[in-house]
Image (cartoon, helix red, strand yellow):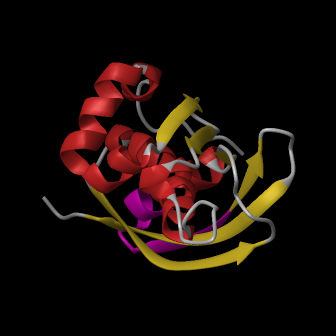
């Protein structure tokens, strides 16, 4: 079930800003400098899905010649977080959002770029809609998989987001 709570243009404007590599890079530099320095970037975004990428390079490496797990976690969280930001920003009431849980499963060494895709845009929209309608906070656990360029699954994260309506 897809719910539209705001004019499509408000969500579309947010998505356009995220998909503008220069503007979003400046946002990361200002708000998430560690992700910016590690090379975490949004590859593509729609209202339903977001794909991020983290490279294996000097600033994202661990001593075992692979991408440091925290850099993988940043990219996974960002893929779901940008979707949550888009839908919270377009909501008819102010909604705060916060990661309240994260679990990671590491399957292979990340030796190159790792791509994380979150396809939970509609689930996030529904959770925010529930929060706005009821005034009660809601939580949503989202699965985000990270794959290498050849499609091999590198890691899987379960990220729990909490949404709360902010009283005016």
User: The N terminus lies in which quarter of the figure?
Assistant: top right
State the image quarter where residue 11 is shown. Answer: top left
- The number of callouts visible is 0
Which residue corresponds to the image point at 22% horizontal and 63% vertical from the top-left?
Answer: 166
Q: Magenta stretch?
A: 129-143
* 75 to the left or right of 157: left
Nearer the observer, 101 or 66: 66
Point out residue 94 in the picture as x, y percentages from the top left corner: 25, 52
Which residue corresponds to the image point at 48% horizontal and 72% vertical from the top-left?
Answer: 138
Nearer the observer, 163 or 79: 79
Residue 32 visible: no
Nearer the observer, 151 or 101: 151
Point out residue 155 in the picture as x, y percentages from the top left corner: 73, 64
Above or below for 54 versus 16: below
Q: Is 157 colored magenta in this rendering?
A: no
Above or below for 74 versus 30: below
Residue 142 visible: yes
């Amino acid at each position: 079930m897809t719910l539209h709570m705001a004019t499509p243009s408000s969500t579309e404007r947010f998505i356009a800003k995220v998909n503008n590599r220069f503007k979003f890079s400046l946002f990361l530099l200002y708000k998430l400098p560690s992700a910016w320095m590690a090379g975490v970037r949004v590859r593509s975004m729609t209202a339903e899905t977001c794909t991020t990428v983290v490279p294996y390079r000097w600033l994202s490496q661990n001593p075992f010649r692979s991408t440091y797990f925290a850099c993988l976690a940043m990219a996974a969280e960002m893929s779901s977080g940008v979707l949550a930001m888009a839908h919270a920003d377009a909501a008819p009431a102010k909604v705060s959002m916060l990661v309240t849980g994260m679990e990671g499963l590491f399957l292979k060494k990340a030796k190159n770029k790792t791509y994380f895709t979150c396809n939970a845009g509609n689930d996030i929209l529904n959770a925010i809609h529930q929060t706005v309608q009821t005034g009660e906070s809601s939580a949503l656990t989202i699965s985000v998989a990270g794959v290498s360029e050849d499609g091999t699954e590198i890691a899987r994260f379960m990220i729990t987001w909490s949404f709360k309506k902010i009283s005016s």
